[in-house]
Amino acid sequence: MYILFNAWCPDDSVFLSDESARAEYVLNDAGLLYRGSHSRLRPTPWNYGQYEPSVLDCCLHVVGKAICSRLSDRADPVAVTRAISAMVNHCDENGVLVGNWSGDYGGGSPPKWQGSVKILQRYYDTGKPVKFGQCWVFAGVSTTGQYFERQKLPQSASRQDRSSALNCYSESRRFE
């Protein structure tokens, strides 16, 4: 049995009263992610895949690895969101994706990813981080994980708290 956050329940902390917002942030299975640079953005269709077989199990496995020691955290949308964010990066807790911005993608290729399903299923099946991801891929996989833990974790009726993919285009990275 899975107990998820419920955007339709007025007593749940993630309740959304606006039906159109629920359709956009909870029920929508596909969207656009933007990649490139701040001066040259390119939309990329993305299949979040929350209705695909085994994706729910994959997402719950990822979250469970991050917060299994504190069961009470599973009832906190903020704690769950932070756990998902940490678990998508392989550097944190042996997570889902290996980041690579080098241009050398032997063993995996960020430009070829079109959705979260194959990434999550490969991680779930092997238990090993998937090669490779870049910011927009991390955003898509993170958003898929949030679909289940909050039924797309809308958190509140304020727009900035709803779950949607967020990417960055001008950032610095720490390389070790």
Image: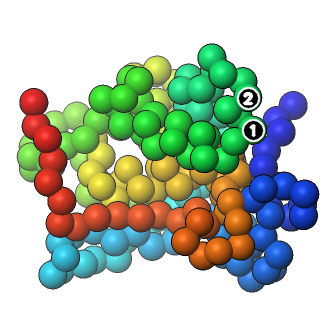
Q: Are the residues at dot 2 and dot 1 in contact (C-beta closer than 8 Å)?
A: yes
Give the percent coordinates (x, y) of residue 118.
48, 43
Question: Label 1 amino acid?
Answer: Ala
- Horizontally, residue 171 falls left or right of residue 96, namely left
How packed is label 1: few (under 14 Cα within 10 Å), some, or many (20 or more)? some
Any mark on residue 75, and which? 1
Give the percent coordinates (x, y) of residue 87.
45, 34
- Horizontally, residue 139 falls left or right of residue 71, namely left
Give the percent coordinates (x, y) of residue 119.
45, 41
- Separation of residues labelled 2 and 1 (CA atoms): 6 Å
How packed is label 2: few (under 14 Cα within 10 Å), some, or many (20 or more)? few
Which residue is at the front of the view, 79 or 91?
79
Quadrant location of the N terminus in the rendered image: top right
| Residue 54 seen by the camera | no
Q: Residue at x 75, y 59 (%)?
A: 14
Q: Secondary structure at mark 2?
A: helix
Any mark on residue 142, and which? none
Quadrant location of the C terminus in the rendered image: top left
Q: Which residue is mark 2?
A: 72
| Residue 19 seen by the camera | yes
Q: Secondary structure at mark 1?
A: helix
Quarter location, residue 60: top right
Give the percent coordinates (x, y) of residue 145.
57, 46
Q: Residue at x 55, y 71 (%)?
A: 160
Relative to 110, is 159 above or below?
A: below
Quarter location, residue 139: bottom left
Which residue is at the front of the view, 116 or 75?
75
Q: Residue at x 9, y 46 (%)?
A: 102
